[in-house]
Amino acid sequence: MVRRSLTSHTYQLGARRLNVLVWRPPTSGPPPAHVTVKVGPLRSGSTWETQRWTLRNGKRHLFALHLKPGPYRVRLSVDPTFVPSQFGQADPRTLGVQVSFDAP
């Protein structure tokens, strides 16, 4: 399982939502990825919201998470990961999903 986090120390005026876009390349072979995204206050282990999605190869998904005022932390986990070289490609890295964050 891969775990990553994004920490924001600023709250954009008027931002009430955080968009988290995840996608996987159109690779044949790896199993679908189970993606979990959590958002909560920076200095606490609590969570305001949790969303889950099963992401298939070549697909994308947009998570829309609700924000509260103040610094926040986003935690993203992906399971299973895959190594493209095990599926006929040259890349030896362990990968999960590609991700982008946006607070409109």
Image: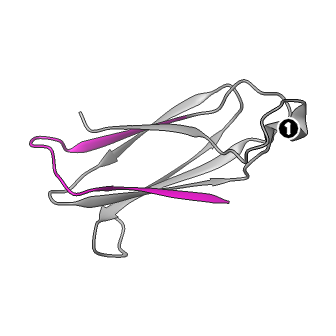
Which quadrant of the structure image shows residue 40? bottom left
Q: Quadrant of the N terminus?
A: bottom right
Q: Secondary structure at mark 1?
A: helix
Image height check: is 1 above or below 18? below
Viewer-nearest residue: 6 or 40: 6
Mark yes or no: residue 49 visible. no
Horizontal side of residue 21 vs 11, given as left or right:
right
Task: State the image coordinates of residue 97 (x, y, percent, origin top left).
Answer: 61, 40
Q: Nearer the viewer, residue 52 or 39?
A: 39
Q: Is residue 39 left or right of residue 4?
A: left
At label 1, counting other C-alpha atoms closer than 10 Å, the crowd grade (few under 14, some 14-19, many 20 or more) is few
- Give the left or right position of residue 52, taking residue 46 as reference: right
- Closest to the observer: 94 or 76? 94
Q: Residue at x 37, y 75 (%)?
A: 45
Residue at left 77%, top 27%?
27
In the rendered image, residue 4, in percent from the top left (x then y), is placed at 51, 56
Q: Is residue 86 left or right of residue 16?
A: right
For the C terminus, the image quarter is top left
Magenta stretch: residue 10 in it?
Answer: yes
On screen, residue 70 above or below 83? below
List the residue tagged with mark 1.
85
- Residue 46 position in % (x across, y down): 35, 73
Q: How many marks?
A: 1
User: In percent of the image, x 24 and y 52: which residue is there?
Assistant: 67
Q: Is residue 70 above or below residue 81?
A: below
Q: Position of residue 69 (x, y in %)?
A: 14, 57
Residue 75, by quadrant, is bottom left
Q: Which residues are magenta?
A: 1-22
Residue kind at label 1, given as amino acid type: Ser
User: Is residue 46 shown to the viewer in this render?
Assistant: yes
User: Coloring scheme of the render?
Assistant: one colour
Q: Residue at x 16, y 50 (%)?
A: 11
